[in-house]
């Protein structure tokens, strides 16, 4: 027996003598020979016994590695958040943990309350008598029901403050407005004017045309007379545009482009006819600059502001709790926009298209209120401006991320897609209703001005991006030819 053991040990020694360190490691991993630190883990009742040499050569029952780290599962909060790829989180995973209660799903509870309120309004005669017009009450109930569905079931957007449901409701309002525009697209102008009386009986009456270019002498009295509530509206509007675009140059280019658009279209809309100092002093240098400056200062403050969110329960004191409640209506975080329109041709093209869309969004309400006979301060006009502002906030944020971070945004966001469809649908409605309404032809100098502007818009990217690309291509071709010539000489 001892001789056999000596023979087997001698044969094993001969076999292992020709192996190096790597080979011994491979043998250990294949036949699973327990090392010194693993021998301590083996219990006395282990199935691998010393008297069974075949068990050492048999493969383990499951050769696949166990997932995890050191036999323990790795959870999402164990990941190293300092890595660049772990900083990216989809919009749907945005979660405000400081107010956990408001993020719990209450879909069935909301459905129950909604149906209870709907049944009360529909089955109570007193409410119907107060409403007088049952069709109007039914339309309002349908709108509220749709918005309730959108708040509960639509996808989340880029913002989580004050609550993702608020921005889902904004998306629902945008969708309702888009559907209304699609319906109006198939109506003629007179029918649309009559339909507006269902919202306001005082509509469907022609309005006198008003011009602001009657007395254009640059005097203090004329400037004082030109200052009205619309100057404040200009400043507030550009404050909102600065909050949307978050770029000084973008706002300045858009402001100057809008004034040129007013010059170009004053033959169609009389209220676009203004004095030169009204265009460039009151509008651009005073109202637009003031709104843009305040808006960009607000953006800079929100960009450098330290954000430290605590739950309402963790906040002590009545004043601190009140401050925490108000902070719920401020941004959760802030992203500075760097459009870089001259960085590449794609960025240039997107910036130009975004400027065109913004110009269309600015000009559309002037044409709609003129065609539908609405005053500039009509509630419908103000609601349209406020609605587009709220829709543009998440839309431009989604567009910026879609351009600059394609790894995170695989497709265009729902807000920017729907807002773009809305503005283009407004353009189609205006184009259809404008037939026969604006008979004065486009002046020749306006045509030449827009033609020169279009040539410059095409010429700049051709020089900025096309010429370097052509030079680079020519250099590559020359290098290829030189390489082929050297190869032929060596042969």
Image (cartoon, helix red, strand yellow):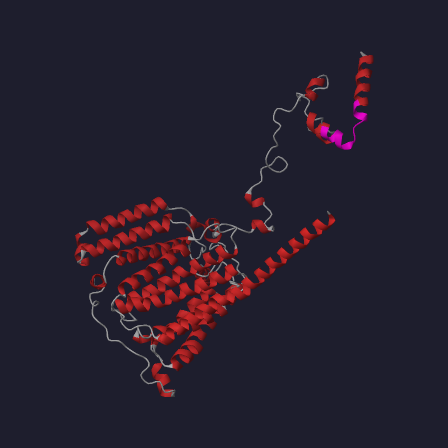
In the rendered image, the vertical position of residue 239 relative to residue 154, given as above or below: below
Q: Main secondary structure of the magenta part?
A: helix
Left or right, residue 340 beside residue 123: right
Q: Position of residue 183 (x, y in %)?
A: 27, 56
Q: Where, quadrant-wise, is the N terminus in this rendering?
A: top right
Q: What stretch is highlighted in magenta?
A: 15-26
Q: Position of residue 286 (x, y in %)?
A: 43, 78
Q: Position of residue 210 (x, y in %)?
A: 28, 77
How many marks are shown on the rendered structure? 0
**Can you see residue 100?**
yes
Left or right, residue 351 beside residue 37: left
30 magenta-colored: no
Q: Position of residue 270 (x, y in %)?
A: 30, 75
Residue 129, quarter of the rendered image = bottom left
Q: Which residue is drawn at 79% across and 31% down?
A: 20
Q: Nearer the viewer, residue 182 or 374?
A: 182
Q: Nearer the viewer, residue 161 or 214?
A: 214
The extreme top residue here reads 1
Left or right, residue 188 beside residue 52: left
**Can you see residue 334?**
no
In the rendered image, the vertical position of residue 18 relative to residue 471, given as above or below: above
Q: Which residue is drawn at 43% across and 61% down?
A: 393
Left or right, residue 426 beside residue 200: right
Q: Residue at x 80, y 27 (%)?
A: 18
In the rendered image, the vertical position of residue 90 relative to residue 131, given as above or below: above
């Amino acid at each position: 027996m001892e001789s056999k053991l000596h023979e087997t040990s001698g044969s094993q020694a001969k076999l292992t003598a020709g192996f190096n360190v790597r080979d011994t490691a491979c043998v250990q991993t294949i036949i699973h020979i327990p090392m010194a630190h693993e021998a301590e883990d083996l219990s006395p009742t282990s199935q691998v016994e010393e008297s069974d040499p075949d068990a050492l050569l048999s493969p383990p029952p499951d050769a696949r590695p166990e997932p995890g780290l050191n036999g323990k599962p790795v959870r999402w909060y164990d990941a190293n958040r300092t890595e660049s790829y772990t900083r990216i989180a989809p919009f749907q995973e945005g979660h405000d943990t400081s107010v956990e209660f408001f993020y719990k799903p209450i879909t069935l509870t909301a459905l129950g309350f909604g149906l209870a309120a709907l049944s009360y309004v529909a089955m109570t005669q007193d409410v119907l008598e107060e409403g007088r017009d049952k069709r109007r009450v039914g339309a309002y109930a349908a709108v509220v029901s749709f918005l309730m569905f959108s708040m509960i079931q639509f996808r989340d957007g880029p913002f989580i403050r004050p609550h993702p449901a608020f921005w889902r409701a904004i998306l629902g309002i945008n969708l309702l407005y888009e559907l209304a525009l699609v319906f109006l697209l198939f109506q003629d102008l007179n029918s649309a004017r009559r339909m507006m009386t269902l919202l306001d009986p005082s509509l469907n009456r022609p309005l006198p045309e008003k011009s602001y270019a009657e007395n254009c002498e640059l005097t203090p009295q004329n400037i004082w007379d030109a200052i009205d509530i619309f100057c404040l509206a200009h400043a507030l509007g550009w404050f909102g545009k600065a909050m949307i675009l978050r770029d000084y140059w973008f706002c300045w280019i858009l402001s100057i482009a809008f004034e040129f658009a007013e010059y170009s279209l004053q033959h169609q809309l009389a209220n676009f006819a203004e004095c030169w100092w009204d265009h460039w002093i009151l509008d651009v240098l005073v109202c637009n600059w003031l709104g843009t400056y305040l808006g960009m200062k607000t953006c800079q403050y929100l960009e450098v502001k330290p954000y430290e969110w605590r739950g309402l329960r963790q906040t002590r004191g009545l004043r601190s709790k009140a401050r925490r409640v108000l902070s719920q209506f401020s941004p959760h975080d802030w992203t500075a926009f760097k459009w870089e329109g001259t960085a590449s041709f794609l960025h240039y093209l997107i910036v130009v298209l975004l400027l065109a869309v913004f110009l269309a969004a600015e000009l559309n309400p002037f044409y709609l209120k003129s065609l539908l006979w609405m005053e500039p301060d009509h509630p419908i006009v103000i609601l349209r401006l406020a609605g587009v502002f709220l829709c543009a906030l998440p839309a431009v944020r989604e567009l910026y991320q879609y351009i600059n971070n394609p790894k995170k945004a695989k497709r265009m966001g729902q807000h920017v897609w729907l807002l773009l469809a809305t503005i283009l649908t407004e353009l189609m409605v205006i184009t259809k209703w404008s037939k026969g309404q604006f008979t004065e032809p486009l002046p020749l100098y306006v045509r030449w001005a827009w033609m020169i502007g279009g040539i410059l818009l095409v010429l700049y990217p051709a020089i900025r991006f096309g010429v370097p690309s052509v030079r680079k291509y020519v250099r590559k071709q020359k290098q290829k030819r030189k390489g082929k010539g050297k190869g032929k000489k060596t042969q």
